[in-house]
Amino acid sequence: MRLGVCYYPEHWPAERWPLDAKLMREAGLSLVRLGEFAWAQMEPAEGQFDWGWLDQAIEILAAEGLQIVLGTPTAAPPAWLSKAYPDILPVDAQGRVRRFGSRRHYCVNSPTYRRHTERIVTAIAERYVRHTAVIGWQIDNEFGCHDTARCYCHNCASAFRRWLQARYNTLDALNEAWGTAFWSQLYSDWEEIDPPILTVAQPNPIHVLDYYRFSSDSYVAYQQLQIDILKSQITNLQHPTSNTQNPFITTNFLGNFADLDYHDLAGALDFVSWDSYPTGYAEVVARDLYEAKVVVKSQPQLAYDVGDPYVTGFCHDLTRGLKQAPFWVMEQQCGHINWSVFNRGVNPGAVRLWTWHALASGADAVVFFRWRAALLGYEQLHSGLLRHDGSPGVGYADLLNMQAERKLMEQVSAHPVKPQIALLLDYHDLWATQLQPHHRDFSYYRHLFVFYRALQQLGLGTDIVPPTADLGHYKMVIAPTAFLGSDKLAATLTDFAAGGGVVLLGVRSGFKTPTNRVTDQPLPGVFRHLVGATVTEWQSLPPGVSFDLASEIPNLGGLAETWVEALGGPAEPLARYASGPFTSHAALTENGIGDGRALYLGWYPTVEQAAAIIQYLTARAGIPRPADDIPPGVVVAQRGPHSIVLNFTNDTITTTIQGQSVTVAPRDAQVVLA
Amino acid sequence: MRLGVCYYPEHWPAERWPLDAKLMREAGLSLVRLGEFAWAQMEPAEGQFDWGWLDQAIEILAAEGLQIVLGTPTAAPPAWLSKAYPDILPVDAQGRVRRFGSRRHYCVNSPTYRRHTERIVTAIAERYVRHTAVIGWQIDNEFGCHDTARCYCHNCASAFRRWLQARYNTLDALNEAWGTAFWSQLYSDWEEIDPPILTVAQPNPIHVLDYYRFSSDSYVAYQQLQIDILKSQITNLQHPTSNTQNPFITTNFLGNFADLDYHDLAGALDFVSWDSYPTGYAEVVARDLYEAKVVVKSQPQLAYDVGDPYVTGFCHDLTRGLKQAPFWVMEQQCGHINWSVFNRGVNPGAVRLWTWHALASGADAVVFFRWRAALLGYEQLHSGLLRHDGSPGVGYADLLNMQAERKLMEQVSAHPVKPQIALLLDYHDLWATQLQPHHRDFSYYRHLFVFYRALQQLGLGTDIVPPTADLGHYKMVIAPTAFLGSDKLAATLTDFAAGGGVVLLGVRSGFKTPTNRVTDQPLPGVFRHLVGATVTEWQSLPPGVSFDLASEIPNLGGLAETWVEALGGPAEPLARYASGPFTSHAALTENGIGDGRALYLGWYPTVEQAAAIIQYLTARAGIPRPADDIPPGVVVAQRGPHSIVLNFTNDTITTTIQGQSVTVAPRDAQVVLA
Amino acid sequence: MRLGVCYYPEHWPAERWPLDAKLMREAGLSLVRLGEFAWAQMEPAEGQFDWGWLDQAIEILAAEGLQIVLGTPTAAPPAWLSKAYPDILPVDAQGRVRRFGSRRHYCVNSPTYRRHTERIVTAIAERYVRHTAVIGWQIDNEFGCHDTARCYCHNCASAFRRWLQARYNTLDALNEAWGTAFWSQLYSDWEEIDPPILTVAQPNPIHVLDYYRFSSDSYVAYQQLQIDILKSQITNLQHPTSNTQNPFITTNFLGNFADLDYHDLAGALDFVSWDSYPTGYAEVVARDLYEAKVVVKSQPQLAYDVGDPYVTGFCHDLTRGLKQAPFWVMEQQCGHINWSVFNRGVNPGAVRLWTWHALASGADAVVFFRWRAALLGYEQLHSGLLRHDGSPGVGYADLLNMQAERKLMEQVSAHPVKPQIALLLDYHDLWATQLQPHHRDFSYYRHLFVFYRALQQLGLGTDIVPPTADLGHYKMVIAPTAFLGSDKLAATLTDFAAGGGVVLLGVRSGFKTPTNRVTDQPLPGVFRHLVGATVTEWQSLPPGVSFDLASEIPNLGGLAETWVEALGGPAEPLARYASGPFTSHAALTENGIGDGRALYLGWYPTVEQAAAIIQYLTARAGIPRPADDIPPGVVVAQRGPHSIVLNFTNDTITTTIQGQSVTVAPRDAQVVLA
């Protein structure tokens, strides 16, 4: 478990650098991320490079024993580049060219930009790839941020057509797949196909889903362009350095970001990392995960300055699940931020709590953002470990306090995070439901998050994994909405169940084919043999309309809201509707498959309902619950045999870990060693 | 009373068509609407037609005895057309070209588009106008939908100038009419006049009203282009077919749509039709009819899946009033929809209730939308009579249940709907108040709807008619806001009153001239002699401010809110203000005119106040009320001597029809024969 | 104290003008504003002038003894100009060209528009500057209204670059000042710099602040262009006329408008004026001054038709403070308006109350808007002193009632308004906090308005003045947020305190340098020696989080919300935090400086807290409070020795003026002579 910091020497006079480096080392930091927004400093004019300042900065840091993660600077092309080559600028969904003046003002499908990317990445790689202090590389920065995942420029239009030709081969195949028979949309020439913007009414959702897929693939290809350059330099290393291993390649993700297929992006990286801003996510991102009516209620029990632990934990677990492997936090909030709604203050202890949360979730390194609050630029009001005037800030004090715990951290981080339950996440299902939510409040992520919160409430760890993941070491798999049901996934889940696993499928699963057409089979389409049940009716319910539920599963009852499906056999009903038009129809079914079983849950559950079902299933499946009576706002995580209890509330709490009562102070983290 | 269905053979393999046709017939359907979105299939490339598939589909349907309403496919020009002739694309109010990828991506003022329209309409007419199964034609589809009534392209700019030259002859006349003396807007060249968009501050409302008029006229002309082609073919029919009458021409309207002058559009059609989606209208359109604060309250008593009966009924009555003649429902919701907010589920009985509501309102035919839920396109999540997998849906079951009632339906529909009360609707008044509501919550439609709901509550049928309608067979005429008061309307209403009729005029009537200038006469301008009263003061009232009312009319009292006018004689006061700055001034006056009388209502009433006034007036005028004690959520309609009671609530209700107590089950329709 | 009216002879037949002029005189009016929207009438085609109608109108008005304020008509260029020279049109922040059809459709940086401005201003000046009836000039109209203060056209881009070159001389200096090291934004060519729009993420706030400054400077220069022309004509006057003084030059401001630096604009004018619309400001503008949660609560005690007296008074006092001199109300609402949300009615007495409020606040003249309600144009539904039909409206009646008070008005207006307290207003601080509010609800104006309301509640008059004002005659200066702390202001305030004054500085003061970089010194930066305290920590607090306060100052306590700063010595603490992370840290400090003292207030106060502090300070500083027990909704103002009590409530109130009890009827104004 290593700690580091993001540093921008280009913002400060060189005279200051040695002091900064010394202070970093003294604070227990061993990693520094550098350079990801310094293209203009590296290449002040086209083809003219200036490495002196960066050489110097690296030497000074290395002299203090700090290791460097170097960023390729492509997230912020310089002014001279934007002015000379306006063709690199992206176009937004309103058809407007987005301009220079902030960052991410480029289109990954611009041949011009790809050419300039090759030059700068090659140059920086050639210069630093063999530097002993440079242990790894971050490619670009936060792909897709600021609504840049999808561009609508003419380069994208051309690239989209090529992508479609590669995917469908013929226009006949595309017309069939897209269902262009609808609304007279048959294409007779590839050039007729445009990005789906500024249409008069709603565009064809199959067209749009393919544009989302194309856009994600475009970023994957752009990332690969950089990886290939870096890899070729790494491969060319003639004289192995003191590095026992080659420099790694990663990039920084954004937790529950939804616009790119993170599984695809993660595939080509050595490991993944993400940028964790708990208070910002609690103020802004939580809206995408909690039901609108829940957001307000969920906060009061929490300390105001620590963020929402379920949101933060969800992002940690999702990031770890991308490769089912340890990850880094490449940017860790260490004081107040500046890009949210209230940018609330942060008190002593919060940074330590977040660091332990990352560690408990499987992080191998935590890199704080940023070293010192900037005097200039958009992030002026963002804090750093040091304040604007250079004095230590609230995060720096926490860092010093953590020094005594470093051994304990090592002890815990020696073990992997290995949960027995997997939650399936598929970005294509997410996009397809986003395009057709049908009910205003139906969201793929919110639905997934209901199950996540239920698991957290029960103290059950989970990996959030792609449908292609090896399910071998799980005992239970939950797929809240496997919307675009594929034969492959049906087979995977059937095999998993047959091998003794428990599969829980949620509403709207199998409604569509992978192409995004509706299945013409009885629902849940490809999954109906797996679950041994069919959806005989379904309804979207407006707010205020709900049906009673009846079940013999302990604590399972209450109301079904938002989305309901009536189920038919032959699977055994575990719950039934007790009022409304579906009265006496099954609402939850269980089907035995080999040594395991598959359940279909026919309504959009509450956290309490989901917890009741999961508790019932884990008890029968012999999945242990290491913790009991976890109060709201408290997270219990497992890393190997050890438990970590994280108290995000203002109160001293008591919980039961492995049968033993544990008391934790407000805003404190405590390790229960096995 | 005939039932039919919208069918899209182009979405399904031809092998399926015979089965579909057979199932249609068996379900009691006799009409099929076809072809309105199949231009790309009819003409796959410019000038190359493919009629084979349509020939075959028509033959298969006709073989089952089904009759065809054929759509001209101009609502969805093909991709090849949009790409080759971008000049056809419309421009939105932000100045952006709207693109191919959904439907309605054309401008009616594009000479290019008119040329292509001529070709495809001529071709389809030549091919099918003499087909014995084709009994009628639908032109285009839902003119103006998706905010397409007004386009701001260069073709429109030119056409607008020509339209203005025809209307005003000289620039002097235009400058005078438009009042361009204001804010230095005098025009010295026709080319200086543009569509009113992207102005820095608010544009001249006279300019904008003329643009609305021009835009509506443009659609009327475009519709006429198609009618002329169809009519010329119909006229050329050499060998009269088995049709006892020539094929009809209609198009499908949108109920309370406000952007086009439906009276003008209706004029040239054989009859009008509309597309009825009760749950969608209740979720979305109701906001345009109910006061903001009322919307929430109005729903709970209703069953969640049947829509708002007053909204649906208003649209039925408005559509019937367009030509004061029977109409069709060209698209009738028959399950859940996909374009609204919650797209709530629909239970058994709802489709039957809607069908009876249409029948009771004067519909001659109800055509369900659609036959089978589509596997493709934007409407994938819209239901049909059959489900995606081909199994019967909730609407199909209702259809089967209605078979036993078909005779009763015939018995009822043999009689016309002939109410004795007319509500005046003038789109120009609507537009002018929309441009200058003055009070945020003042809306022409909302104001009209207050009176409509009052009439429904009293069980009194009404025609919603244009000011040019023959008022001869009415006993009472209500004009909630005759804003642009014309001498002609003043004369019409005076004659009507003189002949024994009752005229009720509401606030803001006569405020303006037909040009949209303010009158320089005492208010209510041209109507002041008719009502024998003047508005001595008026005020817009913010929320929370209200004045007491006092009247000897039974049940008339309470508060005046939103808009108040103090009235002066000589007309007799029937109500007065009892608090506030207008205290003791008249608030409602009555003026004797020949055998009848004219009243002026000086405040924006509540439904209860409007009902009290109408009850008082109808009692005196001898207008019978066939029903009494109608509970909220229950509609009582008359068709000839018969009453139809429609219960949209969840409760069994009892009401009194022609003096006789009638009990109706929840969500049931019941006919009380004379 | 003179009364006048805005008149548009170009809207009415010339036959009417003599009657209007006679009625004006009879109503006690002596001033008429003319011509500011009549360019098209003055110059019907390029270079062809028509002065006949204006000559005639002026003669008719002058014949009744009325004096003329003539407007330069540049706020509304004619259609012919916009069509022939589209280069004059402004571009909005979405990159769209804004079009002809309303007003203000021009860019001050268009060389073309400046050329046409020169021609028309020269022409009108040559024609009328020596007319004895023309006593003064209004330049253009409401600069910046309708979001026109900032334009993003190519002319502006060029002018911005020139402005930057003049400001920074070298790109190195600009790069350093702007901090373009951040996010790779270094500029290597002036042409690379664009207006800050359509950036992908948030632009550099220093870049944006400079664009705001440039835009304001552009208006100042455009105003100066007109002043120079007028002045050159005035200087050329060969034969002094009966005017005892030269004609004045002013323009009409917009109260608390925030987009232009009114101090700069005011500098070149003879005096300033503003347009006062109390009901419109209460409905719309109040949102910018009151905290969101306060707006609703603040209204009920007030009469619904009189506006919000604190908002109106704030604008009066701000306008007077621009030059610390008497001002005019160039447009005074005299009935309902048409551009707000509800455009509520206005009752007898309101216009008189507003007139007295203006007088009490230091106005030398009140010019009513407008003479007669227009039959045409966007303002059709705006009232005038006469109604549309020419009959007298509610304002005219008030005017007649005021005739008996004219002597009293003269008696009061003979004295200046000379408060002993100054509130500092700096538009650059306002812009910089607007660009980085950090907390959603933090607004410079709202913060300032808290102190203003506290002063009003205590009956203490205040000037709202620029930091450059002569502070010599004040005893106390409050600077709520001197954000961009300058050495000059620090010195000014230190001198002021040293001379015996009291300085009260609020949160976030001194956080930045004048360039808009964060200071690298301990906070409050340049002010830390003045206040003898440092901000050791600060936090933005989300809603619902608050800390207790403890103080020995009477009535000072309660909670600190929104923004808190912990303070360190050596200054004496006057209040401390009593809960939360800053517990026991100082929250308010006082530092002795020479004969006076400087306080730093470390939280965003409520009105009650601000009032407690001000009351404590004024008592110690010997600043007298002429009034006591002022009920909410009542304003007590001083002009010389006289007090004016204005009752904006619906109730008869009693208050204590100079120790004597005064009773005032609802909606009445009463003068207490010294």
Image (cartoon, coloured by chain):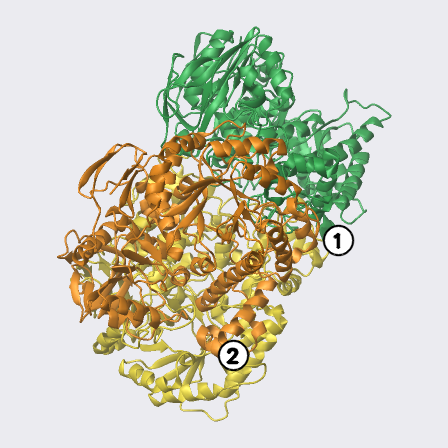
Chain colours: A green, B orange, C yellow
The chain carrying label 2 is: B
Classify 10 Å Cα crowding around label 2: few (below 14), some (14-19), many (20 and above): some
Q: In the image, is C16 to the left or to the right of A368?
A: left
Instruction: For residue C571, say whether it is visible.
Output: no
Residue A293 has which mark? none
Residue A664 percent coordinates (x, y): 44, 18
Q: Secondary structure at mark 1?
A: helix
Q: In the image, is A226 to the left or to the right of C392?
A: right
**Pointers 2 and 1 in contact (CB under 8 A)?**
no
| Residue type for callout 2 | Thr
The residue nearer to you, when weighing A65 against B9, is B9
* Closer to viewer: mark 2 or mark 1: 2
Residue B565 percent coordinates (x, y): 25, 64
Above or below, B630 against A663 in this view is: below
Q: Which residue is mark 2?
A: B170
Outermost residue toward the bottom in this view = C239
The residue nearer to you, when weighing A276 against A222, is A222
Say which quadrant the N terminus of chain C sits in.
Answer: bottom left
The chain carrying label 1 is: A
| Residue type for callout 1 | Ala
Q: Which residue is mark 1?
A: A84
Residue C573 percent coordinates (x, y): 37, 42
Q: Secondary structure at mark 2?
A: loop
Residue C497 sits in quarter: bottom left
Residue A301 sits in quarter: top left
